[in-house]
Image (tube, rainbow, N blue to C red):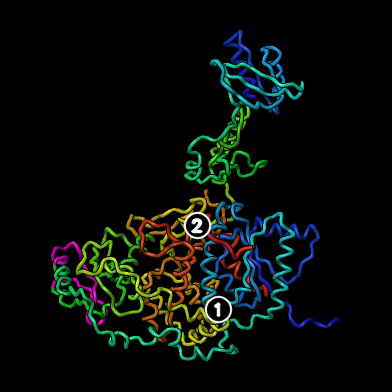
Amino acid sequence: MYTAKHAMLYKHKVHDGQAHVFYMDIRAGGKGYEEFVRRAIEQDGAKYYRGRVSKITEENGKLIVRGADTLAGEPVTIEADMVVLAAAMRPADGVEQLAQKLNVGYDEYGFLLESHPKLRPVETSAAGVYICGACQAPKDIPESVAQASAAASKVLITFSADELTREPEIAKINEETCAACFTCVHACPYHAIEQAEIRTPRGVFVKRTARVNPGLCMGCGTCVAVCPSKSADLEGFTEQQIYSMVESLV
Amino acid sequence: MSERPEFEPKIVAFVCNWCTYLGADLAGTTRLEYPPNVRIIRLPCTGRIDFNLIIKAFEIGADSVLVSGCHPGDCHYTSGNYHARRRWILFRELLQTLGFDLERIHFTWISAAEGHKWQQTVKEITEKTRKLGPYKDLYQISGVEGLEVLSDAPAVAPEALTGEEAHKAETGVPRSTGEEALREACRRLLAEGNVKVVIGYGKRGPVFATRPEDAEQLVWNNQCLANLTVYLKRKEIRALGRPAIVVKGCDERALVVLEKESQIDRKEMHVIGMACEGMGEAKCETCGVHVPRFSDEVIGEADKHPAETGERWKALESLLALPPAGRMAYWAREFERCVKCYACRQVCPMCYCERCLVEKNRPTEIEPSATAKGNFAWHIVRAFHLAGRCVGCDECTRACPAGIDLRLLNLSLAKAAEEQFAYRAGMDPKAEPLIGAYSLQDKEIFIR
């Protein structure tokens, strides 16, 4: 698509120039996109060849592009002033560090992961972090704008209510018995546990403790398994419930 | 009525909600038949699966245990299975040392789309368990051939059994005496007033010097074995004010771990390091830190870079040479003497929880009685809670009135930590804690 746009912009700036486009597939899926490519070909005279370029050599300051037009079944040779590669889109540099900082998942290419491709397309695995645009996947402007609007309205949903609704299965810490080793803080995949202090109403320091941020906790229970004093527990999957299950099983 | 088969294995499966449980569901909806011997316990994530549950399952009579979750990278909670994997690697090592039959503990990754794999896994485990028979060896002393070798415990652990005798037999006082320098430092610190109490060694047990004249009580000789860092967590000591503590190179590792676990504020204490070339203890033979590295002051001199004398895991060798049932019998006999006095917990610098897991009821996670079941449960928990944290001070072994060589359990976990993760507790203040962190490269050869 953006190659068609390049060809058009070139024609608008260099009126007597000629754009040649070698393609295998024209990725023009979307409303009006096919028409856009046709316009580049018909109105702005870009020449499209279905085929690959086999060789580019330099002769007398010109680039000689040899390729094939597989639809016409004949070789094509073009003397070009400039060759532009229609390269693939990739995520911005440093996006992985950002994702790690925000605790958001990303795929092998470095694009950020949504929590569900169909049902939660702008949410991430970190509660309160939303994604839109080309950080998630290669996207053009209309798609980015649409997704940004979606993300914005998701944010507004959060702000529109006085209270945050959460899943019922989240961890809680018995602050009285917490030994404040903060192993759970290290282990929590969502950074949902923080170091806190217990103070009397007059502000006298009593002890340190781990504390769960219920807005961030997703209820995986990793903290329960690593807690040495079992001060952490997971509502809905409490120790009491699970031990009762195990004891009644066999 | 047809005749009842003689043995139907009982298999307890701990599975995660998002992958294996759905995989089992898929097996059901696609009408795949598998043996009904498996009892599934659904947990949100493999990260939630506590090692205690595996022990509990065996305690109540499971013949095999299956633990299963999402494939690496597929965790619904991004990293729960990685955390679990690291724990299993260490836990398996402990179970192996204790002589559990590892053929009865299975770990798998089964995704929500792998109904067939679930079917296959359950079938195979059931068949295997059927062949193995009921788990009769659990916590059993008798019925194992070749145990005579172990009936005189020294074959496994000569050092621990000799106790006090060993120190007397050892003559040489550490080369770096420095007792007077230590007293001088104590007087100076207390006189300056910056430090309110000096925790050091006395003729009989620890000394808590609060006045400059108390410094005379301090000693430094080859009886200074104890790891004094355990007193730092005591409320009575904390109430005295800013402490100064006398540590050897080995004890100092405990400080590193305690600081990492935010139990102490290193700035709020003064550390007097004592150079030490060994006290003639088993641990000293393989000590890697003769000179304290992070102390505020170091008294005395010692070989700075001691050669790694002796094989660190030598003590484990004869135990690991036994077959699993033999190891189990060894520990069952050792634990039979355990009276659950919890001395091992009280002297451990790393056991600082205000409410120990063993005191927790509703649910009772560890059988409180001093029976084989209760003793095993306690020692498994104690050892595993020290995984990647135990600094090898061997205080637990020294304190045990029954002379149980608890050191071996700690050693086996230290060995696993070092071999699998190149991690040695208390050596590097900047290293991530072993439990609570994970690496994508953690080896999972035992997971199918």
- Closer to the chain start, of discs 2 and 1, is 1
The quarter holding residue A240 reads bottom right
- For residue B153, the mark is none
> What SS does tag 2 mark?
loop
The stretch drawn in magenta includes residue B190: yes
Q: Which residue is mark 1?
A: B99
Horizontal side of B220 relative to B50 (left or right) equals left
Relative depth, front residue between A90 and B338: A90
Segment tinted magenta in the rendering: B188-212
Residue A18, given in percent of the width and then of the height, sits at 63, 13
Chain of the residue that carries numbered disc 1 in the rendered image:
B
Task: State the SS at label 1.
Answer: loop
- Mark 2 = which residue? B438
Q: Position of residue B267 (x, y in %)?
A: 27, 58
Can residue B371 be seen here? The reply is no
Question: Callout 2 environment at 10 Å: few (<14), some (14 to 19), or many (20+)?
Answer: many
Answer yes or no: is residue A125 visible.
yes
Q: Residue at x 45, y 88 (%)?
A: B153
The answer to whether residue B403 is above or below residue A6 is: below
**Quadrant location of the C terminus of chain B in the rendered image:** bottom right
* Vertical arrangement, residue B45 with respect to residue B182, above or below: above
Quadrant in the rendering for residue B34: bottom right
- Three-letter code for the amino acid on which mark 2 is drawn: Tyr
Q: Position of residue A2 (x, y in %)?
A: 62, 24
From this view, report whether residue B12 is shown above or below residue B434. Answer: below
